[in-house]
Amino acid sequence: AQSVAQPEDQVNVAEGNPLTVKCTYSVSGNPYLFWYVQYPNRGLQFLLKYITGDNLVKGSYGFEAEFNKSQTSFHLKKPSALVSDSALYFCAVRDTGTNNNDMRFGAGTRLTVKP
Amino acid sequence: GAGVSQSPSNKVTEKGKDVELRCDPISGHTALYWYRQSLGQGLEFLIYFQGNSAPDKSGLPSDRFSAERTGGSVSTLTIQRTQQEDSAVYLCASSLGNRAYGYTFGSGTRLTVV
């Protein structure tokens, strides 16, 4: 079955610095990869996805993510962090090699951006 | 509707009681999913509906949990004889049927079993 790992529970960065939130995955076929963000007391919001094509995908709020097949990774990045980016971030995967249509989520990484 | 609507937003119930959580997906979305988010934890898949197909119930943690989706739209998640470990935020999401589409999540129902 597909699975996702987010190795860092917490990431702290200073405002204006680049940020990276790590994600690795395991699938039997090709992956469809997604990033979601959850602000306090809010539902999850879609940020970006990789389905096919360019390995670098751009999403909402200036975020981007790079699909690396050899490393089975899909790290989320932003060149310059904002305090308002502080939130809980989830990586998710769908496995095209199975009949499962549901998405499996990582445990989440809490990003804190300090002024 | 414009988004995925869940009700109630908060529910406090006594141990042993039954609860029903409701999800109203985006009109036209054929797929509907229930997840559970416990404090400090990731999202745990519970159940998935796709059109008129039999639901994928592989994530339901026990036979106390059940869900139905009437008319391909509104879904109800029922937890019977609630236990304290059932306390969590229950999230519903819907999407178009194609796997390439992401989910749209509701704001969730925070269930507290006392």
Image: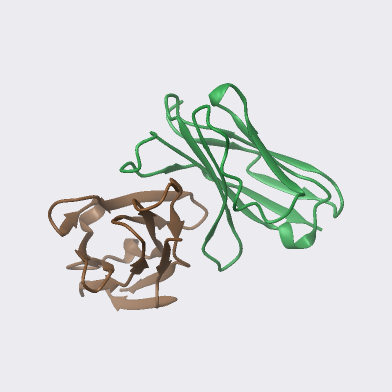
Chain colours: A brown, B green
Left or right, residue A103 beside residue B40:
left
On the image, which quarter does residue A69 sit in?
bottom left
Vertical position of residue B98 compared to residue B70: above or below = below
Vertical position of residue B79 compared to residue B62: above or below = above
Q: Residue at x 37, y 54 (%)?
A: A95
Left or right, residue A53 beside residue A75:
left
Q: Could you tell me residue A76's position as x and y percent?
A: 27, 65
Count of all numbered marks drawn on residues in the image? 0
Q: Of residues A72 and A7, which is closer to you in this image?
A: A72
Q: Residue at x 39, y 49 (%)?
A: A45
Quadrant assignment for the C terminus of chain B: bottom right
On the image, which quarter does residue B2 sit in?
top left
Left or right, residue B31 beside residue B23:
left
Q: Residue at x 43, y 52 (%)?
A: A103
Q: Residue furthest top?
A: B71
Q: Of residues A16 and B15, which is closer to you in this image?
A: B15
Q: Could you tell me residue B14's position as x and y percent?
A: 85, 52
Q: Could you tell me residue B17's position as x and y percent?
A: 85, 47
Q: Could you tell me residue B10's position as x and y percent?
A: 67, 46
On the image, which quarter does residue B61 sit in?
bottom right
Vertical position of residue B100 compared to residue B87: above or below = above
Q: Of residues B73 and B84, which is closer to you in this image?
A: B73
